[in-house]
């Protein structure tokens, strides 16, 4: 049983759908006050409404995490509404699939800006709040793709997800003076709106490649994020947790078949 995070103020970027929505609901169910942030206000509001109907506290805020002014506005709204930001879940991300031969410099920038620059911007915007409070927590949603594995069509995505971990290791040192930790969850294949867009044959093929024989649920990531945000994780910083049903373990297709 983790020490309660009830009453704490949490920003979840990309909180309107998929993993972010899962994180928002897991934190809200434990009594946290959640700012659900995404570009699309209608989806963010729908998630916030779902949380409120379940008895939780949540507001929606439209923000583009790749834009500095927009991120500053998000943090300002969280502070105005809930008094502070105790926990930042830097989760928003995109994963369009395109092989290097077809990838344009603009495609590259769009993914790197949304997934990696955003992590820097969100952390930077929260630093004054963490400094004032004398504490803070950051949980980054990275991936196994990039830091550990590769997949054709995701060179830009993999670079962004590996880049988040490079950022995190130095950020952990710089944030320590504000009594703030930063860690990352590295999901495998988690059933989300974004993943479903890749098609049923992708989902079926992936499930077969996972030792636990199922794709992950958004709550699997929400629970790992909750631990990293908890009092019990206060001495963990600059670290990662892979949550993938064992997906990175098999050395070959035969290894999976022999389970
Ligand atoms: P998803 O279902 O497509 O949801 C993405 C969320 O991010 C939405 O709320 C989206 O809302 C928001 N978003 C996208 N661009 C944004 C921007 N520029 N500013 C603000 N919000 C933005 O994706 P997901 O599968 O849950 O993935 C979430 C995170 O988990 C990503 O960082 C992804 O890399 C990571 N991840 C996912 C998996 C997986 O299997 N699903 C595996 C490993 C890692 P709007 O479009 O309205 O902005």
Image (cartoon, rainbow, N blue to C red):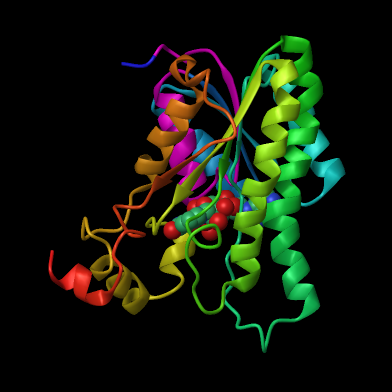
Left or right: 130 in relation to 18: right
Hey, which residue is sitting farthest front in the picture? 251
Left or right: 180 in relation to 80: left
Residue 109 can be seen in this image: yes
Q: Decide whether residue 157 is among the magenta residues.
A: no
Hey, which residue is sitting farthest left in the picture? 258
Left or right: 108 in relation to 27: right
User: Looking at this view, is 193 or 88 the one in front?
Assistant: 88
Ligand 1 falls in quadrant:
bottom right
Q: Decide whether residue 20 is among the magenta residues.
A: yes
Residue 77 can be seen in this image: no
Question: Percent position (x, y) of residue 103?
Answer: 70, 82
User: Looking at this view, is 258 or 103 the one in front?
Assistant: 258
Residue occupying image coordinates x 71% and y 35% = 171
Q: Quadrant of the C terminus?
A: bottom left
Q: Quadrant of residue 119?
A: top right
Decide: is 179 above or below 52.
above
Left or right: 68 in relation to 257: right
Residues shaded magenta: 3-31
Question: Percent position (x, y) of residue 105?
Answer: 79, 77
Decide: is 3 above or below 188.
above
Q: Quadrant of residue 35?
A: top right
Q: Quadrant of the N terminus?
A: top left
Question: Percent position (x, y) of residue 113?
Answer: 75, 58
Residue occupying image coordinates x 71% and y 10% = 134
Question: Percent position (x, y) of residue 184?
Answer: 54, 40
Residue occupying image coordinates x 20% and y 75% = 254
Hey, which residue is sitting farthest bottom in the picture? 101
User: Looking at this view, is 191 or 34 the one in front?
Assistant: 191
């Amino acid at each position: 049983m983790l020490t309660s995070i009830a009453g704490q103020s949490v920003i979840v970027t990309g909180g309107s759908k998929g993993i972010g929505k899962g994180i928002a609901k897991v934190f809200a169910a434990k009594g946290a006050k959640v700012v659900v942030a995404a570009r699309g206000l209608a989806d963010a509001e729908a998630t916030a409404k779902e949380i409120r109907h379940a008895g939780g506290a949540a507001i929606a805020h439209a923000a583009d995490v790749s834009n500095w002014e927009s991120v500053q506005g998000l943090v300002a709204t969280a502070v105005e509404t809930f008094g502070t930001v105790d926990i930042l879940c830097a989760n928003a991300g995109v994963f369009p699939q395109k092989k290097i031969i077809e990838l344009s410099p603009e495609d590259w920038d769009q993914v790197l800006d949304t997934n990696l620059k955003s992590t820097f911007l969100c952390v930077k915007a929260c630093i004054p709040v963490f400094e004032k409070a004398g504490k803070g927590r950051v949980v980054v949603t990275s991936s196994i793709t990039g830091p550990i594995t590769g997949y054709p069509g995701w060179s830009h995505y993999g670079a962004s997800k590996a880049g988040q971990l490079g950022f995190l290791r130095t950020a952990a040192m710089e944030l320590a003076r504000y009594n703030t930790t930063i860690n990352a969850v590295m999901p495998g294949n988690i059933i989300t709106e974004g993943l479903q867009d890749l098609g049923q044959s992708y989902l079926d093929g992936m499930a077969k490649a996972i030792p636990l024989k199922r794709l992950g649920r958004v709550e699997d990531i929400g629970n790992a994020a909750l631990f990293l945000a908890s009092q019990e994780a206060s001495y963990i910083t600059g670290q990662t947790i892979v949550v993938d049903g064992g997906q990175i373990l098999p050395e070959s297709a035969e290894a999976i078949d022999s389970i």
